[in-house]
Image (cartoon, grey):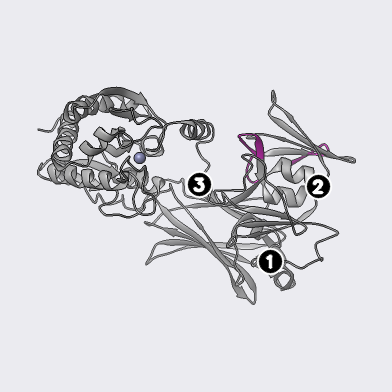
Amino acid sequence: MKKFGFMAIMLFVFILAFPHNGQAAAGNAKIYLDDKELTLPGNAKVENVNGNIMIPLRVVGENLGFDVAWEQKTRTVTIKKDSNVIKLVVNQKTADVNGKKVSMDIAPILRTDTVIVPLRFVSEQMGLTVNWDNNKKIVYLYTQDNQSGNGNPGTGAGNGDDATSGTGSAQVNGISFSDNRLMIATTGQAKVNAFKMTGPDRIVVDIQNANFSDTFSSNAPLDQNSMGSLDISGYPDVSKVRYSLYSNNPSTVRVVLDLTRAKNYKLTNENGLYIIDLNTEDSSQPSKPPAGGKGKKIVVIDAGHGGKDPGTTGITGKREKDFTLSMALKVQKLLKQDPNIDVVLTRSNDTFVELSERAKIANDLKADVFVSIHANSAGSSAATGTETYYQRDASKALANTMHKYLVQATGLPDRGVRYGNFHVIRETKMPAVLLEVGYLSNKNDEAALFSDSFQQRVAQGIANGIKDYLGVK
Ligand SMILES: [Zn+2]
């Protein structure tokens, strides 16, 4: 891990408060209002939350001449202009627009000093035309007076006009995936037909007499060929959601759920919101156990960082990702010798693996333990020693056992077993620990961590700790 300082604390706060909010891939996106770039103050940022583009409400509201007020006690944002009053409450999907209840695809989220709301809500309730350019990561907002002004600079723009003049009488307004459910929001008279296909396994949903709405691209990516996809992480059965204008005659939008195995589903329709629910009893075959056969224990070893993410950099420039990989390979070699253990690495070379993917690997395998290996860093070069982190109560016993072996093996100062809200030990479902073997910001620790004999000794300590915890000898 890098500095366990301010950033870590901020991450901690947000991860804790909003555990289901996917990754924010749109981090440095810009917002243009009538072709003028808006200055995003402080921590205000555009975010992509599970495929929904979310924008900071205050900066947009104020630039449109709305009064924006925040009430901390009720966590309510009120924006007012003339006789228009919109009230939004953090984490609530229902907004109040001029006294009327309006539901949102995704609830407003409180960030450091701003509230972010779905772009689609802004377009519908504040009377803006919106475009999201997913390639350039730019949100374009147009007030009604200006939307024909300088033309649409966004690459995803312009689909709407031609497309909606087609034969489709229904509109697909948005697609999202959460809680193992695909949701397709439509208006108008759509004819929806869902079916399974194999080789590879997938669920296909055809929405006939339909086209993508003008605002669809503000909600999910859509390219100039009226195609797009959502990357899905954290759901073992689903790898991707793809969608396209499949046919022009009759105009048909096709949505495909790419699966990792055959799944049953339930299709429901609530006033045009079509839900393909995968949380259904599975009569299909259980997923094959790829590891852990014959009562073997499955151990997942996670080498922190990798590829484009070097982790922290040591006092003489050594990289955390190299240390963690070397350690993971050594632990793997040792555990492989045990006939009662199957060992799986989240990465076995210098590649980048998403945190969610690391947890998914262990969860899919139904692993017995998960051990993530890291090296630490601090602002002061004096910091030295070994820490073991757990996040869930179910991981405490593993943490205590691992720490005992780890400290003995490193011979570095014992900085204790600690609580840490790190993704990989939070999102895994089995006992999981994150080891901070030593401090790369400390000269002595760094030298030790990159010595082969130290690594070998610590790898043995980690392997012994795992075996002790699992009760395999
Ligand atoms: Zn690290």
Q: Nearer the viewer, mark 1 or mark 2?
A: 2
Quarter of the figure with the N terminus:
top left
Query: In this orientation, does residue 144 appear?
Result: yes
Which one is in front, 418 or 190?
A: 418
Secondary structure category for the residue under label 1:
loop
Q: Position of residue 331 (x, y in %)?
A: 18, 42
The quarter of the image that holds ligand 1 is top left
Which one is in front, 376 or 78?
A: 376
> For mark 1, does the 10 Å Cα neighbourhood hold few (<14), some (14 to 19), or many (20 or more) residues?
many
Instruction: Tell me the residue at 66%/37% (across/down).
Output: 114
- Look at label 1 and name its amino acid: Ala
User: Could you give the CA–CA distance between mark 1 and mark 3, rounded to whole angstroms?
Assistant: 25 Å
Q: Which residue is mark 1?
A: 157
What span is colored magenta in the figure?
Answer: 97-115
> For mark 3, does the 10 Å Cα neighbourhood hold few (<14), some (14 to 19), or many (20 or more) residues?
some
Which one is in front, 206 or 105?
A: 105
* 376 on left or right of 137: left
Q: Which residue is mark 2?
A: 64
- Look at label 2 and name its amino acid: Leu
Q: Nearer the viewer, mark 3 or mark 2?
A: 2
Q: Earlier in the sequence, mark 1 or mark 3?
A: 3
- Look at label 3 and name its amino acid: Gln
* 311 on left or right of 60: left
Q: Is mark 3 within 8 Å of ligand 1?
A: no
Look at the numbered discs 1 and 2 and tell me whether their residues touch, using CB distance below 8 Å. no
In the picture shown, does residue 103 fall above or below 140?
Answer: above
Q: Earlier in the sequence, mark 1 or mark 2?
A: 2
* 338 on left or right of 110: left
Q: Which residue is mark 3?
A: 23
- Is residue 269 rendered magenta in the image? no
Which of the 4 image quarters holds residue 379?
top left
User: Could you give the CA–CA distance between mark 3 and mark 2, rounded to whole angstroms?
Assistant: 29 Å
